Amino acid sequence: TVTYLRELGCFDEVDYDYVMGTTEEGEAKVTDNPNYNDQTNLGLHNIPNGWTQNGKHPGGSPDVVVAVIDTGVDYNHLDLRNNIWINTAEIPDNNKDDDGNGYIDDVYGWDCVGNDNDPMDDNGHGTHVAGIIAAENNKLGGIGVAYGCKVMVLKAGNSSGYFNNSDIAEAIEYAYMNGASVINMSFGGSSISIAVEEALENAYNS
């Protein structure tokens, strides 16, 4: 148990691996996206006004990378595929860690659950969240709040929508070490591990 291991005094830190769960929620005019009028929250929160006020990058800059720590993201989705962050320092499928970051062939991000380089969504929640953030302005479907930004895909939740804190901590560390500007985590729970707290503190101070 954690108590027993702590009492041994031979480990720097011992903590529980808490489990969390998901929480539900071309040059084109935004009105050209067929589902735009159904996205009432955009107007409610005055998001379109923010787009027009930003003369340089309406919808956000592609230099802004949003790490979506969730159940993965369908990076082939028509409304997302052009707004997925690509690790350009990595050569795909050569089975090498080209950029020396400790992850092999991590082109789109990382799957911390399966410990592999394919963070494809097998639940749907992460893709939904990514769409709210950065669905492209492409005359298809809806449009994201920051439709010009890029999404770094980090899978820390399994197909049932549950997240181990150890996977969350690894995903946070990957995000800030690989240049994410923002970290989005749309899940919750009643407890948080020391590992996640430290990862968040390191990300904030990096």
Image: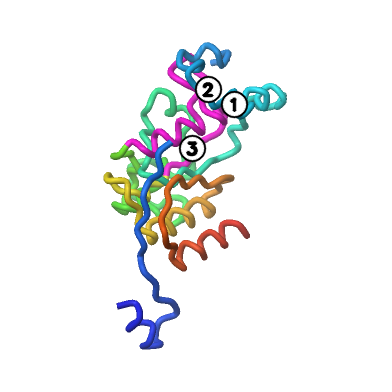
Q: Crowding near pointer 1: few (<14 within 10 Å), some, many (20+)?
A: few
Q: From the image, tell me which residue sits under label 2.
A: 40
Could you say where residue 127 lies in the image, as x and y percent from the top left?
A: 39, 34
**Residue situated in front as seen by the camera: 191 or 5:** 191
Q: From the image, tell me which residue sits under label 3.
A: 151
The disc, 3 or 2, on the residue closer to the chain's N-terminal end is 2
Q: Crowding near pointer 3: few (<14 within 10 Å), some, many (20+)?
A: many
Do labels 1 and 2 touch, CB within 8 Å?
yes
Name which quarter of the figure residue 141 lies in: top left
Q: From the image, tell me which residue sits under label 1.
A: 44
Which span is picked out in magenta?
Answer: 124-153
Horizontally, residue 165 falls left or right of residue 114, namely right
Name which quarter of the figure residue 46 lies in: top right
Q: Amino acid at mark 1?
A: Leu
Per the model, the C-alpha gap separating discs 3 and 2 is 23 Å
**Magenta region includes residue 165:** no
Per the model, the C-alpha gap separating discs 1 and 2 is 6 Å
Q: Amino acid at mark 3?
A: Val
Q: Crowding near pointer 2: few (<14 within 10 Å), some, many (20+)?
A: few
From this view, report whether residue 177 is shown above or below residue 41: below
